Amino acid sequence: MKKSLASGIAILFVAFVLIYVIVTPDMDLFNMNKSWGTKKMYVRVTADSQQPPEMVRGTKDSRYHYYLVAYDVTGNARPISFSTSKSLKPDSLLLVLVKGSKDKNGNHTVGRYDVIELDKVPARVREKLELRTG
């Protein structure tokens, strides 16, 4: 009895997970922890936002650090910081997932970012970033 009940619960759990994954196809299972508790915000990379690259100790790799102001869909601003192994082109538009935590300078940290096109930037944010449409 107990064995069949446990098997039934396990089957229901697996079915629930499968249905959830099918219903939410854009879900990134490998990066979910980077998006939990974050807020979608938008930034425009500027030439002066990139700090000189720092070498990662013990490797030949370097990290580029960025300090920017991000805006949410309603136009509220937050100072953010993040680092990446890639140098981002000035005027690149990014969708950033901003965490609640802050770095030692009081900037909100970023869990993840994606380069996006102008048409993905909300109108209010375009105004704040002084982006021209058309």
Image (cartoon, grey):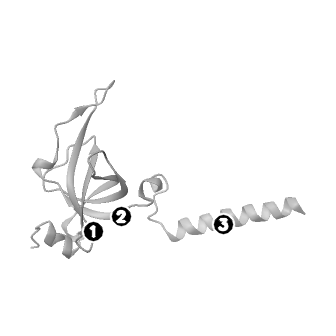
Residue type at mark 3: give it: Ala
Residue linked to disc 3: 15
**Residue 22, percent from left and from top:** 54, 68
Question: Circle 1 sits in a helix, a strand or a loop, which is it?
Answer: loop
Q: Image point 10% across, 67% down: which residue?
A: 130
Q: Is residue 25 left or right of residue 133?
A: right
* Distance from Cα at disc 3 to Cα at disc 2: 30 Å
Q: Earlier in the sequence, mark 3 or mark 1?
A: 3
**Residue 14 location, quadrant:** bottom right
Contact check, label 3 and label 1, Cβ < 8 Å: no
Residues at marks 1 and 2, CA–CA distance in whole angstroms = 8 Å
Residue marked by disc 1: 72
* Mark 2 closeness class: few <14, some 14–19, many ≥20 residues within 10 Å: some
Q: Are marks 1 and 2 in contact (CB under 8 Å)?
A: yes
Residue 3: % across, % down: 86, 58
Q: Residue at x 56, y 68 (%)?
A: 20
Name the quadrant of the N terminus: bottom right
Residue occupying image coordinates x 47% and y 56%: 32
Front in this rendered view, residue 26 or 39: 39
Tell me which amino acid carries mark 2: Lys
Q: Nearer the viewer, mark 3 or mark 1?
A: 1
The residue pinned by badge 2 equals 39
